[in-house]
Image (tube, grey):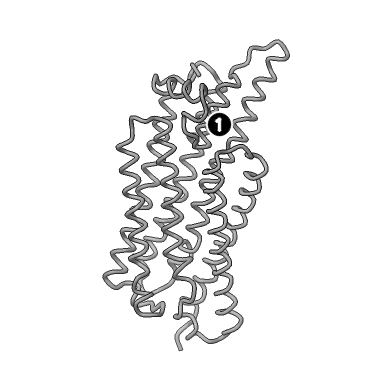
């Protein structure tokens, strides 16, 4: 009698990891909701849309877990049905990354408008990974079941490769471009501004690299372990990972604000502040994806400074 572990274990582990990132997302959403009440409405809508989407994702996943491991306990024939996994699997795992990556494209465009061709390139790659994710789930709808051998038919294989390679490529490009832009504006004269841009660079590298690694892990498992469901271990977590990437970036403005306030407090004791409030506001504006025309002088100053490659003038 064949072991049930290759069928049941990946689904269980993937669901547990997904719940972990979902819990982290709830904390991030709470911090955002209580701290950044004056963000643009479109940004608030995006945050709440992603949080609602991941909540629905977790609910559908929990419903399947109850059905597979409780209602149909011991019945392995219940697993190939797939139930809702086609929605919170490939569909959500390609839709949420696309939304997050397009947001970062817009952020890059706001930071430096002259790189708009790269923004378009990343957007097209992101759209390609969404289309690839949809193609990878077509066999499930056609056959009406989550048949393991059919995971590697031609359409599913091509769709999965396009989906995962495009997603990882977009993440890497975003990390590289943001790092270059922030490094170009780093000041060596002002210690605090140097630290702020360095922390921003590290955050972008860490978050985008982590999401890219999750996609690469999915691709490696898909290629090296055909005929198994171990791809679901990272696969179920992809939507929550990308949503956390965006929320962590937005909430990092708390750290930037506290560093700027600490330097400002130093001036009350007769010390010369190393960073002024105008710079802090301009950085916070850029982190909130606000368009330059909506924020007035701060964004103009920031844009000029980055164009000159010197954020110390902000």
- How far from the left and from the top, in percent, is residue 6? 46, 76
The spot of residue 261 in percent (x, y) is 66, 25
Picture quadrant of residue 159 = bottom left
Residue 60: image x %, image y %? 55, 69
Instruction: Look at 54% across and 50% down and name the residue there.
Output: 244
In the picture, measured across the screen, residue 275 lies left or right of residue 10, that is right
Q: Residues within 10 Å of mark 1 (few under 14, many from 20)?
A: many
Secondary structure, mark 1, is: helix
Q: Is residue 98 above or below residue 177?
A: below
198 vs 120, nearest the viewer: 120
* Residue 171 place in picture, x, y as percent: 40, 46
Compared to residue 10, the image places residue 95 above or below, namely: above
State the residue at coordinates (49%, 45%): 207
Q: Residue at x 35, y 46 (%)?
A: 123
- Residue on which the image places disc 1: 284
Judged from this view, the residue extending furthest toward the top is: 270
């Amino acid at each position: 009698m064949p072991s049930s572990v290759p069928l049941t274990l990946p689904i269980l582990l993937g669901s547990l990891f997904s719940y972990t990132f979902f819990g982290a997302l709830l904390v991030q959403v709470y911090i955002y909701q209580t701290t950044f009440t004056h963000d643009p409405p479109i940004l608030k809508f995006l945050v709440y849309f992603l949080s609602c989407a991941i909540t629905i994702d977790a609910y559908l996943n929990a419903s399947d877990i109850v059905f597979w491991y409780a209602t149909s306990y011991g019945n392995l024939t219940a697993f190939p049905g797939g139930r809702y996994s086609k929605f919170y699997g490939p569909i959500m795992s390609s839709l949420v990354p696309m939304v997050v990556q397009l947001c970062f494209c817009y952020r890059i465009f706001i930071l430096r408008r002259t790189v708009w061709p790269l923004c378009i390139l990343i957007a097209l790659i992101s759209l390609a990974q969404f289309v690839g994710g949809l193609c990878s789930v077509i066999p499930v709808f056609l056959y009406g079941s989550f048949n393991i051998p059919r995971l590697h038919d031609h359409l599913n294989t091509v769709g999965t490769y396009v989906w995962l390679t495009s997603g990882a490529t977009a993440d890497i490009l975003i990390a590289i471009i943001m790092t270059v832009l922030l490094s170009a504006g780093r000041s060596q004269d002002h210690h605090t501004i140097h630290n702020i841009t360095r922390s921003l660079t590290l955050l972008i590298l860490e978050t985008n690299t982590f999401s890219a690694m999750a996609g690469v892990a999915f691709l490696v498992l898909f290629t090296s372990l055909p005929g198994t469901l171990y791809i679901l271990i990272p696969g179920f977590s992809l939507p929550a990972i990308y949503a956390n990437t965006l929320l962590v970036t937005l909430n990092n403005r708390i750290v930037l604000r506290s560093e700027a306030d600490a330097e400002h407090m130093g001036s009350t004791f007769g010390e010369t502040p190393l960073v002024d409030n105008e710079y802090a506001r301009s950085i916070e504006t850029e982190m909130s994806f606000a368009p330059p025309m909506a924020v007035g002088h701060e964004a103009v100053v920031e844009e000029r400074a980055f164009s000159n490659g010197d954020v110390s003038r902000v």
